[in-house]
Amino acid sequence: QQQVKQSPQSLIVQKGGISIINCAYENTAFDYFPWYQQFPGKGPALLIAIRPDVSEKKEGRFTISFNKSAKQFSLHIMDSQPGDSATYFCAALNSGGSNYKLTFGKGTLLTVNP
Amino acid sequence: NAGVTQTPKFQVLKTGQSMTLQCAQDMNHEYMSWYRQDPGMGLRLIHYSVGAGITDQGEVPNGYNVSRSTTEDFPLRLLSAAPSQTSVYFCASRVGLPYEQYFGPGTRLTVT
């Protein structure tokens, strides 16, 4: 059972455009939603994270939008740059759970064309 | 801080061989975990540990063994390698709060 569904699998955007990646979750106990960025040959690294008490969080060109009632959250990359080309993973965590396991989506390969 | 370190970076094994992937962190993190990454499958949790002496299974534990004798180290053992275990393996660690998880650079394993 996949608890976090991520779409699309791949995305091609022109330089300067907006990249949007969506995730949906099922477990209403999730209360921490991070996004990870992974460059080829490297481990994933935390990009930005949100808690469900806010509907939006922005850090530079990266914004998370969160819709608690729809159980969905998305990553928006404004003014996308070729250097943003990477694989992006959404994830979710139940901080009140006994095992603190992060549940990951399957990833989105973003390509930003110059 | 070196963060999370993994050795080796690359490994080729023959079917049936055993080996240990090493993972160490110097951030005094309680929580450590092992993932495997395969194309189209995302990051799948193999085993995890919430502290020294405490380990538990993730979603794909078969064929792998772990132990956690110290806070710093969390080795992953392949008991009898199979071609299905060809993958990239990532070790990760974090504290309870603020939940940011740090990943190592990965080990690319090929089983022939």
Image: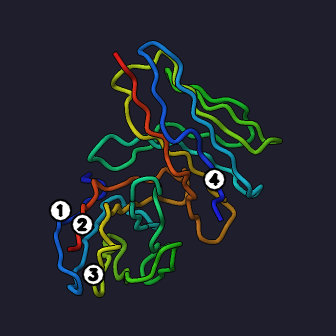
Q: Nearer the viewer, mark 4 or mark 3?
A: 3
Are there few (<14), some (14-19), or many (20+) residues within 10 Å of tag 3?
A: many
User: What is the residue that sits farthest to the top in this orientation?
Assistant: A16
* Percent x, y of residue B30: 45, 67
Question: Identity of the amino acid at label 1?
Answer: Phe
Chain ID, mark 1: B
Q: Are marks 2 and 1 on the same chain?
A: yes
Q: Is residue A10 left or right of residue B92?
A: right
* Chain-order first, disc 1 or disc 3: 1
> Residue B84, labelled with which disc?
none
Mark 4 vs 2: CB contact within 8 A: no
> Residue B109, labelled with which disc?
2
The image quarter containing residue B86 is bottom left
Question: Identity of the amino acid at label 4?
Answer: Val
Q: Nearer the viewer, mark 1 or mark 3?
A: 3
Mark-to-mark CA distance, 4 and 3: 30 Å
> Which SS class for mark 2?
strand
The image quarter containing residue B39 is bottom left
Mark 1 vs 4: CB contact within 8 A: no
Q: Are marks 3 and 2 on the same chain?
A: yes
* Percent x, y of residue B33: 43, 67
